[in-house]
């Protein structure tokens, strides 16, 4: 089983992580393209419809199911309701107070013209009745007055044209009525008009108002013909005093239409839209078109929009990585790991999206975004995890038809997961993180459910159950995937480092029994390295665990190293300096081999390989020079140097410094010497490594070196302290007290 895992890891690294002869830029571009295509395929696959081409009235031959959950607006029914709401709005009218005056003026003008016409006719009749002149006088008069005399029919016709709203019969009656009576009729007509205009009435009310005017006119104390005349005049001249306001009415109608909520229909995933044997209806066609199934039309606009959103998100994420996460950006393996985590969560989202709907629960709340957040935080860093959480949450909302409640839930759960693993000391902490996610999501999902009116409390209970299940999935996936991701991508979590720091680890157990001196030396180096790394902001856990294993190569030949000598025997006295140097520097190579055999993380292997850099094994080099005083040219300095490389990280450089300082201080026997020289010695050793160039590639600054030196001094001063010399009389008193204690115990 283990061999199969190793073979898969090698195959995956070679063909998928790019361990082939191509540049890092090509690898990065290749995996970026694969990543974009993968995300795009997951998000746009729903926009590619099935082959369905049905018509209204056609008999369906197979069950048609909804490929996804969708809520859509029925535009036709919505428009019908809005039109009905607009028609139900009452017309808006504005009172015109000048209408009464205009009507009265019209009535007065009519009666005035009647009186003028009557006067003209009466003058004509008087002239004909009182004419006693002779024929010659009459002829002379006719020659002096050429105007024609008024014709009653023409006068009536003229009045009829001028006042079309008044019947000819009324004009004829008034022409035959005495003038004083006409004035009375005028007064009564205007009085009734003023009475009518005490009310407000619209064009719709006008027929009723005219009826009231007629009824009132018929009660007057005139003969019937005159009462009918008054009624006719009022019917013809009355106008509504409430004028229709077109703009205000349209505004109210528009507001009424806007208040009408769209008629929506929700179709659940796997719901049968049309059963086999059913006749296709217009409503069925609407649902098919809303789902994009009818006539196999591909929604190109939605696809383009989705790709634009994906591109924007990826560009922003890339800029963030390049500017603020350069270590991740420069490492193809870490980039692929991030991409894999995104794809895993989106695939889970798609799986949840295609699951059949379950009563009383909203399945998208089950998406465990916090899995990616936790694993990225543990295997990379917190800042990277937060950025990835935002990215994944946004894309998850697109999977679920732009449901940004899902995005908020994913973001919050991811943050809770990140905060929960800020200090991981064991794998059970990942389980605790899952429970924390469950607890927070219970409240969040409850809030989502209660925002809308709750018509079924089972929905609330069901969604709370989904929130709890989300946390359980987070705990299961995070715990289960972590070791596989560590192994495949060569990433190491703090959990792995803590497991390696356990003294029961096989390599450390061997050191205790086979190389106890080296083991004790490694413990002191670990204390020095951890404190120094913590003080300069480096990875203190990596420095400590790397120190535990930095000398495991000595397990191959432990008795050749001074800390493991038995008695005063020195095995190097029987060997040449060249062979001794070869044995000493081989412990680095042996350590790397042992680390690989025991599958130690690459960071630990790097520390083992780099903790001596290319330093000179000066003791045996000097011996070789002294043994060949006459032929120094035959001594190759390279034979007495470690193979390197120089420390490539701060942690490896710190372990190098801690290693050389601890060995030197121990060899000086500072527990009996003056500790005032301790700081000077440590600073001199650090300075030597700096001058040799061993720290050039480690990114340590001069300020860091000063802090490291102070950390070493503080720790070593506590270990190799000066013992207090007690006076002789106090020592005798202590022995006497000890003897008395023993006698009393007997």
Image: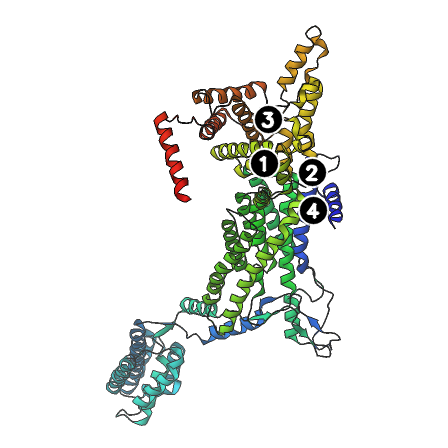
Q: Residue at x 37, y 85 (%)?
A: 208
Q: Is residue 500 above or below residue 65?
A: above
From this viewpoint, which residue is outermost toward the top? 630
Which of marks 1 and 2 precedes in the sequence? Answer: 1
User: Which disc, if any, is residue 596?
Assistant: 2
Is label 4 or label 3 in front?
3
Distance in Å between CA atoms under marks 4 and 3: 34 Å
- In terms of secondary structure, where does tag 1 sit? helix
Q: 160 or 231: nearer the eye?
A: 231
Q: Which residue is mark 3?
A: 697
Within-10-Å neighbours for mark 1: few <14, some 14–19, many 20+: many
CA gap between label 2 and label 1 equals 15 Å
Q: Nearer the viewer, residue 324 or 557?
A: 557
Give the Cα separation between the discs numbered 1 and 3: 23 Å
C-alpha separation, residue under disc 2 versus residue under disc 4: 32 Å
Write down the residue under mark 1.
548
Q: Nearer the viewer, residue 666 or 328?
A: 666
| Residue named by callout 4 | 34
Callout 3 crowding tier (Cα within 10 Å): few <14, some 14–19, many ≥20: some
State the SS at label 4.
helix
Q: Residue 550's x, y, as percent?
A: 61, 33
The quadrant holding residue 284 is bottom right
N-terminal label among 1 and 4: 4
- Measured along the vertical axis of the image, is residue 684 above or below residue 348? above
> Where the C terminus falls, by quadrant?
top left
What residue do we see at 64% from left, 23% from top?
A: 569
Task: Using the numbered discs, state the Cα–Cα distance from disc 3 to disc 2 in whole angstroms.
Answer: 24 Å
């Amino acid at each position: 089983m283990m061999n199969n895992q190793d073979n898969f890891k090698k195959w995956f690294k070679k063909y998928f992580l790019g361990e082939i002869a191509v540049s890092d830029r090509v690898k990065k571009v290749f995996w970026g393209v694969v990543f974009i295509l993968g995300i795009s395929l997951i998000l746009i696959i729903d926009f590619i419809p099935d082959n369905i081409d049905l018509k209204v009235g056609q008999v369906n031959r197979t069950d048609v199911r909804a490929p996804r959950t969708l809520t859509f607006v029925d535009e036709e029914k919505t428009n019908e309701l809005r039109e009905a709401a607009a028609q139900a709005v009452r017309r808006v009218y504005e009172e015109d107070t000048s209408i009464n005056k205009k009507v009265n003026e019209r009535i007065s003008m009519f009666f005035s013209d009647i009186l003028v016409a009557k006067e003209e006719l009466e003058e004509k009749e008087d002239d004909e009745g009182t004419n006693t002149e002779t024929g010659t006088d009459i002829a002379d008069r006719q020659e002096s007055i050429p105007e024609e005399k008024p014709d009653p029919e023409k006068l009536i016709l003229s009045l009829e044209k001028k006042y079309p709203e008044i019947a000819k019969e009324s004009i004829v009656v008034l022409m035959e009525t005495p003038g004083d009576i006409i004035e009375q009729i005028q007064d009564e007509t205007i009085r009734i008009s003023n009475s009518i205009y005490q009310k407000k009435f619209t064009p719709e009310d006008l027929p009723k108002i005219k009826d009231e005017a007629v009824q009132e006119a018929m009660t007057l104390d005139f003969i019937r013909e005159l009462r009918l005349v008054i009624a006719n005049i009022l019917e013809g001249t009355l106008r509504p005093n409430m004028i229709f306001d077109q703009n205000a009415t349209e505004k109210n109608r528009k507001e009424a239409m806007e208040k009408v909520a769209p008629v929506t229909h929700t179709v659940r995933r796997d719901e049968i839209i049309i059963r086999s044997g059913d006749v296709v209806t217009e409503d069925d066609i609407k649902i098919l078109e809303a789902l994009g199934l009818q006539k196999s039309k591909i929604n190109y606009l939605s696809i383009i929009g989705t790709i634009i959103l994906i591109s924007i998100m990826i560009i922003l994420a890339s800029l963030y990585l390049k500017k603020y996460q350069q270590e991740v950006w420069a490492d193809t393996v870490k980039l692929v790991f991030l991409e894999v985590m995104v794809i895993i969560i989106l695939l889970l989202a798609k799986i949840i999206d295609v699951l059949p709907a379950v009563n009383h629960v909203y399945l998208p709340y089950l998406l465990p975004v916090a899995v990616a957040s936790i694993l990225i935080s543990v295997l990379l860093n917190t800042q990277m995890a937060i950025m990835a959480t935002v990215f994944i949450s946004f894309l998850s909302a697109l999977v679920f038809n732009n449901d940004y409640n899902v995005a908020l839930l994913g973001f919050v759960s991811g943050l809770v997961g990140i905060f929960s693993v800020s200090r991981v000391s064991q794998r059970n902490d990942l389980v605790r993180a899952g429970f924390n996610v469950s607890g927070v999501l219970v409240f969040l999902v409850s809030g989502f459910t209660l925002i809308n009116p709750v018509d079924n409390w089972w929905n609330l209970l069901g969604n709370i159950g989904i929130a709890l299940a989300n946390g359980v999935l987070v705990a299961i996936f995070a715990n289960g995937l972590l070791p596989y991701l560590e192994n495949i991508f060569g990433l190491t979590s703090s959990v792995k480092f803590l497991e390696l720091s356990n003294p029961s680890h096989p390599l450390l157990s061997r050191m205790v029994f086979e190389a106890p001196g080296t083991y004790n030396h490694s413990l002191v180096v670990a204390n020095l390295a951890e404190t120094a790394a913590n003080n300069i902001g480096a990875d203190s856990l990596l420095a400590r665990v790397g120190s535990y294993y930095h000398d495991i190569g000595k397990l191959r030949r432990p008795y050749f190293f001074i800390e493991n000598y038995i008695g005063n025997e020195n095995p190097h006295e029987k060997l040449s300096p060249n062979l001794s140097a070869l044995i000493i520097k081989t412990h680095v190579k042996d350590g790397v081999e042992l680390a690989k055999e025991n599958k130690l993380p690459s960071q630990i292997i790097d520390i083992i390989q780099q903790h001596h850099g290319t330093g000179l094994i000066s003791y045996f080099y000097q011996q070789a020079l002294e043994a060949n005083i006459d032929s120094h040219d035959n001594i190759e300095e390279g034979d007495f140097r470690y193979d390197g490389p120089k420390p490539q990280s701060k942690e490896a450089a710190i372990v190098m410094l801690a290693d050389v300082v601890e060995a030197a201080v121990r060899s000086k026997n500072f527990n009996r010497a003056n500790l005032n020289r301790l700081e000077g010695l440590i600073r001199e050793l650090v300075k030597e490594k700096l001058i040799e160039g061993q720290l050039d590639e480690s990114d340590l600054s001069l300020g860091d070196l000063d802090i490291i030196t102070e950390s070493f001094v503080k720790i070593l001063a506590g270990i190799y302290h000066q013992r207090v010399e007690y006076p002789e009389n106090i020592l005798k008193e202590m022995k006497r007290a000890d003897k008395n204690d023993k006698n009393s115990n007997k």
